[in-house]
Image (spheres, coloured by chain):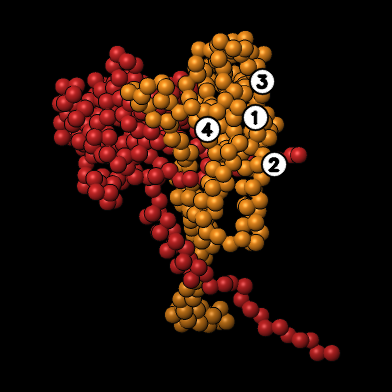
Chain colours: A red, B orange
Amino acid sequence: MPKIKLPTKSPHIDMTPMVDLFSLLLTFFMLTASFRPQEAAQITTPNSISDKSAPDKSIITIDITKDSKIFFDFNRNGLTFDRTGKEVADTATHYRKTLLEKMGERYKISFTEAEKKKFDNGTSFGMPVANLKRWLDSDSPKEKEAMQIGIPNDSADNQLALWVRFARLTNPNAEVIIRGDGDADYKTVKKIIDLMQDNKVNKFNLVTNLQKQEAKLDE
Amino acid sequence: MAEIIQEEKQEKGGRKKPKKHSTDIDMTPMVDLMCLLITFFMLTTAFSKPKIMEITMPEKDQKQKPEDKTKVQADRTYNILMAGDDKVYYYKGLADPKKDLPELIKTNYGKDGIRKVLLQLNKNVFKQVEELKTKVLKGELVMADSVLNRKIKEIKKSDKKAPIILIKADDKAKYKNIVDIIDEMAICNIASYAVVDINSVEEDMLKTAPK
C-alpha cells in the first residue's frame, strides 16, 4: 500500500497581525490608564456589597487612617466640573490653587507662585497649615512623609472644617468621599460627618471594597 | 598536486555567497511581554476605580424643635447598638428611662447573627424583592435596571409593617462596624433606617449588657 504523504507545513505561524493588534491595545491601555496617585497613608477600606463606582471628578476626599489621622484631598484626578456643571480639567479652573490662596489668606501665610503650582498638581496632604509651606518646598520624600501628621480637627483649631468650607466655596458641586480605614474609630468618622453636616453636606460616599454576600431566608 | 588545485579552487570560489539569513525575527518573547503588559494595564484601569457606599444622613437643623422631630412608631422600631470589640446588640421599641428598659439581645456581625434577625423582621419585603429578582434573572420578566430598581423601591415602601432600624454606635465602635451594619441593611432590603446618635440611657444599657 502506498503511503499517503502529508504535505509538510511549517510550524511557524505568522504572528505579525497579532503583534500589530497587541501593540495597538497596549498603546490604548497605556494612554487611558490613570494611575492611582501616591497615597499619603496605607488605608484598608471595609467591605460592602455596594457596586456603585465612586465619582472621579469634583471630589473632596477625606482619608482617615487606622490611628485616626486625617488627610484631605481636592480634585484628586485633576478633573472637575466647573460652576455650570461642565467637565473640565482642573488645569483650566485651578480650584486647588484658589483653595490654597483662600486658606493662606485666612492664616496669613503667603505662598509663592511655585508653591501654588506644586499644590495645584499635588494630591492628598495631612498637616497643619503652618507646615504646609515647608512641605511644599521640601524635596526629600522622607521629610515630607514625616510631616504628614494629620489635619487638626479639634474644636480649638478646626482646620479641617475650614478646608472643607473653602473647598465647597471654591467648587459648590464638589461631592464628599470618606475613605476610612476599617479599624479607625467611629468617633473620628462621626466627628467628620458632624462637621460636614455643619457645612450643609448630608450625602456621603463611603469608599468600600466590593464583596458579594448572599442572604437566604430560612423558614 | 591535488592539494594545490584544491587551494586554487578555494581561492576561485572566494566570492562566497553571503549566508542567507531568514527575514523572520522570532517574535515570541515580544508577544509574551506584550501580553503581560496588556493584562497589567487592563487590570489596573478596571480596578483603580474604588467602589462606594452612599449614605444620606438626616439633616441637622438647629432651629428644629424637639417636638417637630420625626416620630417613629415604637412597635416597628428596632435599635441596633454597637459597642467596642465587635460587639453588637439590638432591642425593640424605645428606651424610656421612666418605664422598664427593654432587654438588650446580643448578636454578632456574621450571617447567622444580625442578618438572620433582620431577615426575619423584614420577611415580607425580602421575599417579594427576591421573587421579583429571580423572575428577572430567569427571563420571565423583562425590564430595564432602572425599572427594576423603581419596583423594588415601591415594594419597600408598600409594607407598612416593615421594621424601622435605628443604628447607634458608641464611641468605642470601629468604622468597619458601622459599614457592616449599613451593608446588612442593603443585603436585607430594609426600607427605612437611620444612623443616629446614641443617648445616655442606651449607653447605660450597654454597660450592663450581657458580655
Amino acid identity at mark 2: Lys
> Circles 3 and 2: CB distance less than 8 Å?
no
- Residue at image mark 2: A216
Q: Position of residue A132 (x, y in %)?
A: 25, 25
Q: Relative to A105, say whether B140 is above or below.
A: below
Amino acid identity at mark 3: Ile
The answer to whether marks 3 and 2 sit on the same chain is no
Say which quarter of the image contains residue A76.
top left
Residue at 67% across, 13% down: B210
- Residue at image mark 3: B105
Is disc 2 placed on a helix, strand or loop? loop
Q: Position of residue B143 (x, y in %)?
A: 55, 60
Q: Position of residue A214 (x, y in %)?
A: 65, 42
Q: Taking the image as drawn, is residue B176 in sight?
A: no
> Circles 3 and 4: CB distance less than 8 Å?
no
Is disc 1 placed on a helix, strand or loop? helix
- Residue at image mark 1: B114
- Residue at image mark 4: B193
